[in-house]
Amino acid sequence: MKRPLLLCGQALSAASTVKYLGVEISSNLKPKEHIDQRITAAYKASFALESRGLVYPEMLVDMLFLYFLCFIRPVVY
């Protein structure tokens, strides 16, 4: 039987994930949860741009790239 880990006499409980320096680290050390969160954040940022009419099919590639740099990349990294 495992003994509980104590800190100042209090037992610490186990967590399935921990956020450290902005990265979600799961108990099995797989990056799936962190990657899923970053993908969801990128979709939300992209949808916010589209729903406000800031992105349209005739846009120049340079402008799309700037939108990516300013609005999507910060939430992915």
Image: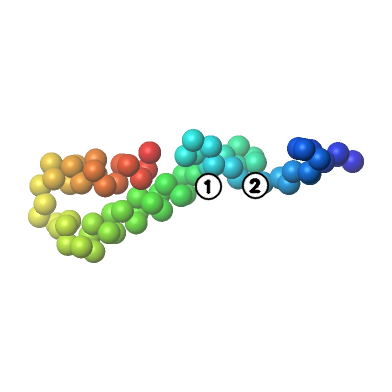
Q: Position of residue 15 (x, y in %)?
A: 67, 46
**Looking at this view, is 21 or 52 the one in front?**
21
Q: Is residue 58 above or below residue 29?
A: below
Residue found 65% across the figure and 47% down from its top = 16
Residue found 60% across the figure and 37% down from its top = 29
> In the rendered structure, are the residues bearing label 2 and label 1 in contact, judged by CB atoms less than 8 Å apart?
no
First in residue order: circle 2 vs circle 1: 2
Q: Which residue is mark 2?
A: 16
Q: Secondary structure at mark 2?
A: loop
- Label 2 crowd (10 A; few <14 / some 14-19 / many >=20): few
One can see residue 31 in this view: no
For residue 31, side relative to residue 75 (left or right): right
Which mark is on residue 24? none
Q: Position of residue 7 (x, y in %)?
A: 76, 37
One can see residue 33 in this view: yes
Residue found 64% across the figure and 40% down from its top = 28
Mark 2 or 1, closer to the camera: 2
Q: Secondary structure at mark 1?
A: helix
- Farthest right residue in view: 1
Q: Position of residue 9 (x, y in %)?
A: 81, 40
For residue 34, side relative to residue 47 (left or right): right
Q: Position of residue 48 (x, y in %)?
A: 27, 59
Q: Which residue is mark 1?
A: 33
Picture quarter with the N terminus: top right
